[in-house]
Image (spheres, rainbow, N blue to C red):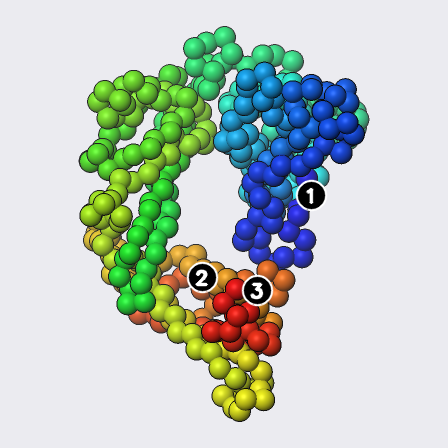
């Protein structure tokens, strides 16, 4: 599918719902009998996942009549697995141009990953054995021969004849090493004074394995009781984790996601996490009234508008992440603030003291890209906004 965000300068959110229910336009009698299973009921369910500006779509029917139901999370997860495979083959980001430049490879990947509408081969190690990743020489050979013989392998993947289909046989590396990255996302609601009201932490463990032979590894946690709602790569021995709370696995070769998890809640009623202060504090100030074009507050004949001010600061956090070799203040990278505006805002004029801000008139969303932030900096965003007539807070239109 082509990028559905259009001219949006930053695709913050998917422009369509993850799951939509659509009527079958070919089902004229309403019974779903136009060459299809009558149990489908004339309804098509459309699943979507937005990645790198591309919307991955899957259309399916729900055969409720024969007692079956399609798991929606299975389809959404499979769409993300396709996107991850494209990133592995075509590089990051796997956007529209990357798919167009490697259309033959993308088509072959879909042929191997889907069999009669069901997921079949999704492991990267098996796919790279079946379909060679695109190289300069392979593209030259394909252009000269006009075929895909340089893409598709004639031999079966070596992992298909073993009990470990996720790992190749006879893997050899000159330097045996494995890299582990723990990526955690904090979703929190913070009050105006900076105190934490509710929070939720979702994490994943990303690995890059360059180990020879058949390595058998064990990953342990200092406090496994904080780990909840786990999902694992097929290489993990789940029974061992249930019994001993350790992750025992034979890793695939190359990059893979070992597991996902959620951090256990604490406190009264389990409403927040034991994380102390948030690493970043955002202090907003918003006021409404009648303003002129220069933003000065004037009489009742002026436009209804408001002022907005944001101050972002980095706060001291746990010393567990400090390195003994670290010098200078702690620097937080890739800091960005997303500000959704109400639909009744006509326009907004925003200025920042650090970084750059982009306001999307169509989506009513502003994105302030700060970049690097340390404890000594206090970047600010100031601006004015003009509201539609009758939309002043407190009026019936403004409250809707």
Camera-side residue of 328 and 367: 367
Disc 3 + disc 2, Cβ < 8 Å: no
**Secondary structure of residue under mark 2:** strand
Residue annotated with mark 2? 337
* Residue 238 position (above or below residue 399): above
Q: Earlier in the sequence, mark 1 or mark 3?
A: 1
Camera-side residue of 41 and 201: 41
Circle 3 crowding by C-alpha within 10 Å: few under 14, some 14–19, many from 20: some
- In this rendering, does residue 33 appear at all? yes
Residue 388, image x and y in percent? Answer: 60, 74
Q: Residue at x 69, y 28 (%)?
A: 42
- In this rendering, does residue 114 appear at all? no
Q: Which mark is residue 343?
A: 3
Q: Residue at x 27, y 28 (%)?
A: 219
Q: Residue at x 49, y 82 (%)?
A: 289
Residue annotated with mark 1? 2
Q: CA distance from mark 3 to mark 2?
A: 19 Å
């Amino acid at each position: 599918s082509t990028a559905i965000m259009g001219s949006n300068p930053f695709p913050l959110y998917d422009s369509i719902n993850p799951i939509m229910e659509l009527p079958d336009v070919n089902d004229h009698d309403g019974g779903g009998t136009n060459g299809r299973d009558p149990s489908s009921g004339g309804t098509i369910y459309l699943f979507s996942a937005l990645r790198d500006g591309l919307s991955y779509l899957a259309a399916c029917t729900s055969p409720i009549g024969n007692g079956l139901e399609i798991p929606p999370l299975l389809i959404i997860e499979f769409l993300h697995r396709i996107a991850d495979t494209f990133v592995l083959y075509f590089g990051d980001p796997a956007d529209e141009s990357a798919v167009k430049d490697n259309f033959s490879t993308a088509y072959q990947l879909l042929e191997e990953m889907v069999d009669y509408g069901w997921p079949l081969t999704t492991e990267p190690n098996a796919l790279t054995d079946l379909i060679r990743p695109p190289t300069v020489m392979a593209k030259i050979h394909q252009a000269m021969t006009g075929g895909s013989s340089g893409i598709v392998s004639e031999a079966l993947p070596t992992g298909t004849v073993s009990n470990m289909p996720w790992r190749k046989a006879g893997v050899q590396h000159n330097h045996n090493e494995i890299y582990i990255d723990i990526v955690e996302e904090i979703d929190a609601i913070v009050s105006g004074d900076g105190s934490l009201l509710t929070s939720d932490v979702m994490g994943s463990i990303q690995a890059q394995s360059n180990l020879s032979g058949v390595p058998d590894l064990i990953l342990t946690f200092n406090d496994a009781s904080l780990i909840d709602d786990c999902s694992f790569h097929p290489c993990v021995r789940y029974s061992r984790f249930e019994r001993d709370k350790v992750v025992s696995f034979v890793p695939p070769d190359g990059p893979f996601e070992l597991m996902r998890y959620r951090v256990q809640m604490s406190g009264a009623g389990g409403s927040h996490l034991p994380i102390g202060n948030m690493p970043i504090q955002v202090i907003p100030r918003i006021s409404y009234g009648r303003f002129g074009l220069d933003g000065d507050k004037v009489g009742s004949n002026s436009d209804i508008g408001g002022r907005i001010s944001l101050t972002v600061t980095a706060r001291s956090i746990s010393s567990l992440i400090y390195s003994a070799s670290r010098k200078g203040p702690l620097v937080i990278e890739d800091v960005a603030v997303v500000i959704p505006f109400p639909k009744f805002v006509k326009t907004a004029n925003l200025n920042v003291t650090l970084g750059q801000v982009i306001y999307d008139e169509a989506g009513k969303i502003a994105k302030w890209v700060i970049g690097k932030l340390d404890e000594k900096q206090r970047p600010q965003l100031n601006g004015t906004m003009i509201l539609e007539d009758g939309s002043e807070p407190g009026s019936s239109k403004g409250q809707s």
